[in-house]
Amino acid sequence: MGNVLEYRRNNQGKQQQRETILDDAAPEVAIPDCPPHLKDEALSEYKRICEELKKLGLISRIDRAAISAYCKAWSEVVYCEIKIDEENANDPRGQAGFIAYTPNGYQQMSVWVQVRNRASERMMSFLKEFGMTPRSRRKSSQFDNTPSLPFGDGWENL
C-alpha cells in the first residue's frame, strides 16, 4: 500500500499510470459480512444487491459500510413510500401523504416526502459509486456492452 500512496504523490496528473498501479491493488471480490443493524427491507436489499454485485465482480469486503448505507437509504425510501400511501388512503383527496399544512395554513411538502427525497438522494449517490445506474455503467469500462459487429475478415475490403 505504501508504494501506491508514494506513486500517487510523485506522479500527480498522470492518470493512466496511476490507474495501472491501483488496479494491481484491487481487493478480492467477496461479499462482506452483513452488519447486524440491517433489518427487514434493508437486510433483503443487502442480500439481493450483494449477489448481483458479486456476479459483476464489483464488491469486496471493504465495501461493507457503503453497501449497508445504500441499503439503509433504500429501506428509508420504501418506508416513506408506505407511509405516504397510508396517509393518501385515509385522505378523501388522496394527497395527505404529499402535502402538509403549516400552522398559518400554507401548503408544504409532507415530512414523509422530505425524508424520502433525502434518502433517495443518498441512495442514488451510492448507486453511482457501484455502477448501478445506466449512466455510471456507460462511463465504466467494466461494463463495455458495445455489441461487436458480426462481420469477419473480408468485410473490411468493401
Image (tube, rainbow, N blue to C red):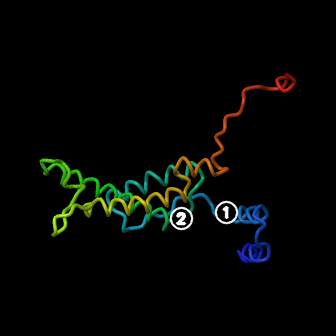
92 sits left or right of 115 in the view: left
Horizontal side of 151 relative to 105 (left or right) equals: right
Check disc 2 and report the residue beneath it. 63
Q: Residue at x 12, y 48 (%)?
A: 92
Residue type (three-letter) at the residue carrying disc 1: Ala
Vertical order, 157 against 147 (above or below)? above
Mark 1 Cα within 10 Å, few/some/many (few <14, many 20+)? few
Horizontally, residue 98 falls left or right of residue 124, namely: left
Q: Is 154 rendered above or below residue 48?
A: above
> Residue drawn 14% across and 51% down?
91
Q: Amino acid at mark 2?
A: Asp
Quadrant of residue 145 in the image? top right
Residue 27: give x, y in percent of width and height.
64, 63
Q: Quadrant of the N terminus?
A: bottom right
Image side of residue 77 versus residue 96, left or right: right
Q: Which residue is at 31% across, 58% downward?
A: 40
Name the quadrant of the C terminus.
top right
Residue pointed to by mark 1? 26
